[in-house]
Image (tube, rainbow, N blue to C red):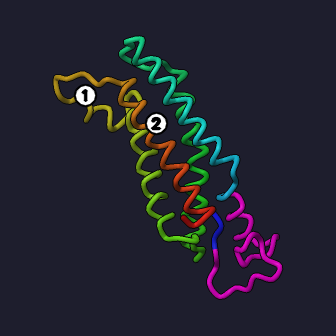
């Protein structure tokens, strides 16, 4: 996410942020905009989607502990991006387009859903309250592919402004 800080010049700044390279805000923005973090979370969700689709096609009713471990690892990396984005926004940094904030909120909501659907998660009980069983692989495939697309779109609005 290439962010601007109001009232700053561009001479000697970092990637148009208006910050000096040693400025803590510049370092925070650089961490938030790190392509490898975005790639890790998007690729992680792609792998999780494929995993869930294969499990669904094999008619498995649940996903194993390895799936949930990988999901939690992806969520930890995503939490770093969310936290740095929130801190940057509170400190006054603004993305090229305010649409980036919408995608940030949607990605955060998706992460909450992913976390809540894990075994013993707070959303799991709500999903299994009725007599109909939770189709875990299919549900997680849909959630993970949606999350992957939201992450990529959030990156596009932050990095390119559209």
Sequence-wise, the earlier of marks 1 and 2 is 1
Residue lying at the far front in this picture: please name it: 162
Q: Quadrant of the C terminus?
A: bottom right
In the rendered image, which residue does mark 1 sit on?
A: 128
- Residue located 44% across and 62% down the image: 102
Magenta stretch, overall SS: loop
- 147 sits to left or right of 42: left
Front residue (pair 67, 98): 98
Q: How far across and down, in percent of the image, does residue 124 sit?
A: 32, 32
Q: Is residue 30 above or below residue 61?
A: below
Q: Is-magenta flag for residue 111?
A: no
Disc 1, SS? loop
Residue 27 forms part of the magenta stretch: yes
Q: Residue at x 24, y 22 (%)?
A: 133
- Residue at the spot of label 2: 144
* Residue 79 place in picture, x, y as percent: 56, 49
The quarter of the picture where the N terminus appears is: bottom right
Residue range corresponding to the magenta coloring: 4-31
Q: Residue furthest bottom?
A: 7
- x and y, in percent, of residue 149 in the image: 49, 45
Q: Residues within 10 Å of mark 2 (few under 14, many from 20)?
A: many
């Amino acid at each position: 996410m290439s962010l601007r800080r109001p009232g700053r010049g561009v001479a000697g700044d970092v990637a148009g942020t208006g910050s000096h390279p040693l400025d803590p805000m510049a370092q925070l923005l650089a961490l938030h905009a790190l392509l490898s973090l975005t790639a890790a979370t998007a690729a992680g969700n792609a792998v999780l989607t494929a995993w869930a689709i294969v499990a669904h096609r094999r008619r498995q009713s649940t996903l194993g502990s390895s799936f949930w471990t990988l999901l939690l690892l992806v969520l930890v990396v995503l939490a770093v991006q969310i936290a740095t984005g929130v801190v940057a926004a509170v400190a006054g940094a603004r993305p090229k387009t305010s649409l980036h904030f919408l995608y940030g909120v949607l990605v955060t909501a998706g992460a909450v859903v992913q976390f809540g659907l894990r075994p013993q998660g707070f959303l799991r009980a709500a999903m299994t309250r009725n007599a109909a069983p939770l189709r875990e692989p299919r549900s997680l495939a849909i959630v993970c592919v949606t999350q992957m697309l939201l992450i990529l779109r959030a990156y596009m609005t932050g990095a390119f402004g559209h």
